[in-house]
């Protein structure tokens, strides 16, 4: 999730852009505006901006973009909620707001127009807005578990030249394969199928592995030069973790679940309750249950006889 913030003086221009039919725009948030058409929306913005004529750039415009990886999750309602929280945290509140979603690009994105002149005539602060925006975008990305692309994934690779082009190809391959392999042999095999050779660097003349080198298209890079996460020690740690996780899954799947002990509650008379237990008790406990019942009856009879003797 990233945001691009601009300011201007022409409400009609930004409204026409946001609600452009060619962009298949869809309004998902509208506050303090009449939305009969683009003309009425612009008039509302301009009327409120007139409360503070000294502000030469009352137009606030924010493009809020998300990764294409989150496209299936970001419904109109979800993206509207995130946009509202972003505005709240930025201090853009108690003012006119128009948020429209565009569908003209592969990644989900919305355009926000807001009046920098609030409903009470004050000017909404733009102090350190870019720094604050960057921080808030990262916080919301983490909060809603959105896709977090690192720096290497944002590089426009089609513009790269060798050897950087190969380096980023290796980065993509390793990122995928390391996570799905459980040992070095499997990783070597999978990379080789994709034209990547892998070899270890040893400490002196010993058999102690000191590093790792990947080669493709005639270029070679140490794992840590491709990315720090691809040093020998870090890859080895991930492979071991993958193996342990797979082992735990296999162990769990082979376990026979314990059968829960039936629990019975007394819902009626003693006869119904004891009879219900008898239906689920093993056969070898039936005699014991009857014997206990007979002994209890004898005790009650003897007790009654004693009571009668005391009365006389």
Image (spheres, rainbow, N blue to C red):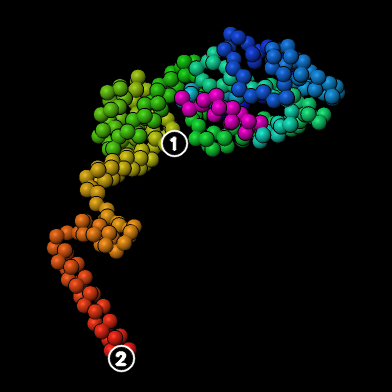
For residue 228, the mark is: 1
Which one is in front, 209 or 167? Answer: 167
Mark 2 or mark 1, which is nearer the start of the sequence?
1
Closer to us: 270 or 278: 270
Whether residue 236 appears in this view of the structure is no
Q: Which quadrant would residue 11 be assigned to in this image?
A: top right
The residue that appears at 51% across and 20% down in the rendered structure is 107
Q: From the viewer's perspective, is 39 left or right of 105? A: right
Residue at 76 percent of width and 19 percent of height: 45
Q: Outermost residue, front direction?
A: 312
Disc ID at residue 139: none
Q: Secondary structure at mark 2?
A: loop
**Above/below status of 211 relative to 156:** below
Q: Quadrant of the N terminus?
A: top right
Please tell me which residue is depicted at 48% across the width and 27% down the height of the picture.
Answer: 73
User: Is 261 left, or right, of 120 in this rendering?
Assistant: left
User: Spatial distance from mark 1 to mark 2, Cα to Cα?
Assistant: 99 Å
Residue 312, disc: 2
Inspect this view and state whether residue 289 appears. yes
x, y (%) of residue 182? 28, 37
Mark 1 near mark 2, Cβ–Cβ under 8 Å?
Answer: no
Q: Secondary structure at mark 1?
A: helix
Q: Residue 25: name its quadrant.
A: top right
Q: Residue at x 21, y 77 (%)?
A: 298
Question: x, y (%) of residue 285?
Answer: 16, 64
| Placement of 68 over or under 92, stated as above or below | above
In magenta segment, residue 79: yes
| 1 or 2: mark nearer the eye | 2
Extent of the magenta region: 72-87
């Amino acid at each position: 999730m990233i945001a691009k913030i601009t300011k201007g003086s022409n409400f009609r221009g930004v409204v026409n852009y946001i609600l452009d039919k060619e962009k298949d725009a869809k309004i998902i948030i509208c506050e303090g505006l009449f939305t009969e058409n683009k003309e009425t929306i612009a008039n509302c913005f301009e009327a409120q901006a007139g409360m503070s004529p000294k502000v030469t750039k009352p137009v606030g415009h924010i493009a809020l973009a998300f990764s294409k990886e989150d496209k299936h999750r970001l419904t109109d309602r979800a993206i509207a909620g995130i946009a509202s929280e972003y505005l709240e945290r930025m201090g853009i509140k108690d003012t006119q707001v128009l948020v429209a979603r565009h569908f003209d690009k592969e990644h989900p994105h919305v355009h926000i127009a807001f009046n920098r002149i609030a409903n009470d005539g004050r000017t909404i602060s733009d102090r350190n807005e870019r720094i604050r925006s960057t921080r808030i975008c990262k916080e919301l990305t983490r909060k809603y578990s959105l896709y977090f692309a690192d720096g290497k994934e944002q590089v426009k690779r089609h513009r790269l030249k060798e050897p950087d082009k190969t380096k980023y190809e290796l980065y993509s391959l390793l990122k995928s394969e390391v996570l799905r392999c459980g040992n070095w042999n499997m990783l070597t095999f999978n990379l080789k199928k994709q034209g990547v050779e892998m070899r270890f660097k040893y400490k002196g003349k010993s058999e102690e592995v000191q590093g790792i080198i990947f080669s493709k298209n005639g270029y070679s890079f140490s794992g840590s030069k491709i990315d720090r996460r691809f040093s020998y020690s870090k890859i080895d740690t991930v492979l071991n973790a993958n193996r342990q996780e797979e082992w735990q899954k296999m162990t769990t799947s082979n376990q026979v679940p314990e059968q829960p002990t039936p629990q019975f509650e007394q819902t009626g008379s003693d006869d119904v309750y004891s009879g219900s237990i008898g239906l689920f008790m093993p056969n070898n406990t039936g005699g014991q249950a009857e014997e206990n019942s007979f002994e209890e009856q004898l005790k009650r009879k003897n007790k009654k006889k004693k009571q009668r003797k005391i009365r006389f």
